[in-house]
Image: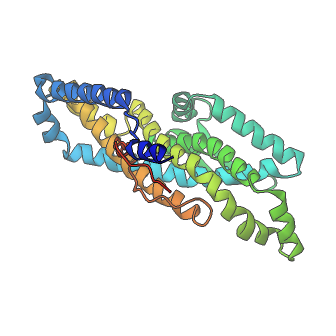
Amino acid sequence: MSDVHDHADDLKIVGKRYYGRWLSALVVLLCIVAMAHSMINNPRFEWGVIAENFTAPSILQGVLMTLQLTAISVVLGFAFGTVLALMRLSSNPVLVTVSWAYTWFFRGVPMLVQLFLWYNIAALYPDIVLSIPGFGEIWHADANSLVSPFSAAVIALVMHQSAYAAEIVRAGIQSVGNGQIEAARALGYRPAQIFRHTVLPQAMRAIMPPAGNEIIGQLKTTAVVSVISLQDVLFSAQIIYQRTYEVIPLLLVATLWYLLMTSVLSVGQYYVERYFGRGVTRREKRGVWPSLPRFSAPKTERSVSNG
């Protein structure tokens, strides 16, 4: 028996070695270093031109226009989308049909086509007239003067955004269990109170992740307004490279600005999601950025206890 104990004392536990993990990480790092070296040392990137134009007044003006279009379309789009979602969830078949038809149309037509349609709306309606039967005309405007490139972009972006926002909000509301609503009714809550205090706080946890992605996508979608000569960040870059013929550096300037703006929105999305998920999801100890994989292996040797 003592021989068995002596033999157990000599046993060593050797941790598993993840050679494949280390090898794959090394290969990926070498590829990243090679790409970075190629980009930094390639004179055709013209990093000096990029640095010179990154904060050019016209580029900054384009950035402000991009942020303005994004903010307006997101706020109005989600407000109108919430109305559409409530219409879709109502028991009125007319409201349900209208909401479904609106969502079907504006999700099915490409954003660029919608933009051209609103920009050329004067071809269909040269004069926009508001009249009331029995009172006659109360307001009149010329469509060409009323629908400017900015207003056409806002209308197209809001219509496009509201169709997607309606589905996001509808899915979030439907994620709340019927038991929660029935419990609120049993406590004597009115329908408005049920929606505000019971449905909405729980629905926001399901709404925020896709809504954050939709906002980031909407910021990138604003780039299509450059086709109607609205000076966003992309159109500002195009104006400069049409004069200097430095196409690639100016496109990289626009690319870096889009990456910067989407990164800021991603950070905001992270904290908003954590706020609405408090008390339900496990609080993550890591920050905004994903933690790096741990490559540390267990101790290679450990004595076996005699107990």
Q: Count the marks.
A: 0
Q: Say which residue appears at 54% left-offset and 44% top-offset.
A: 214
Q: Say which residue appears at 30% left-offset and 35% top-offset.
A: 255
In-front residue for pair 277/3: 3
In-front residue for pair 189/146: 189
Is residue 242 visible to us here? no
Quick check: 284 left or right of 77?
left
Name the image quarter holding residue 176. Answer: bottom right
Q: Say which residue appears at 19% left-offset and 46% top-offset.
A: 55
Q: Say which residue appears at 67% left-offset and 46% top-offset.
A: 166
Vertical relation: 141 (above or below) 33: below
Name the image quarter holding residue 180. Answer: bottom right
Quick check: 78 left or right of 116?
right
Quick check: 176 left or right of 154?
right
In-front residue for pair 212/87: 212
Its colouring scheme is rainbow
- Residue 212, given in percent of the width and then of the height, sits at 52, 49
- Residue 249, given in percent of the width and then of the height, sits at 20, 30
Is residue 104 visible to us here? yes
Name the image quarter holding residue 242. Answer: top left
- Residue 268, given in percent of the width and then of the height, sits at 44, 56
- Residue 60, given in percent of the width and then of the height, sits at 26, 48
In-front residue for pair 235/42: 42
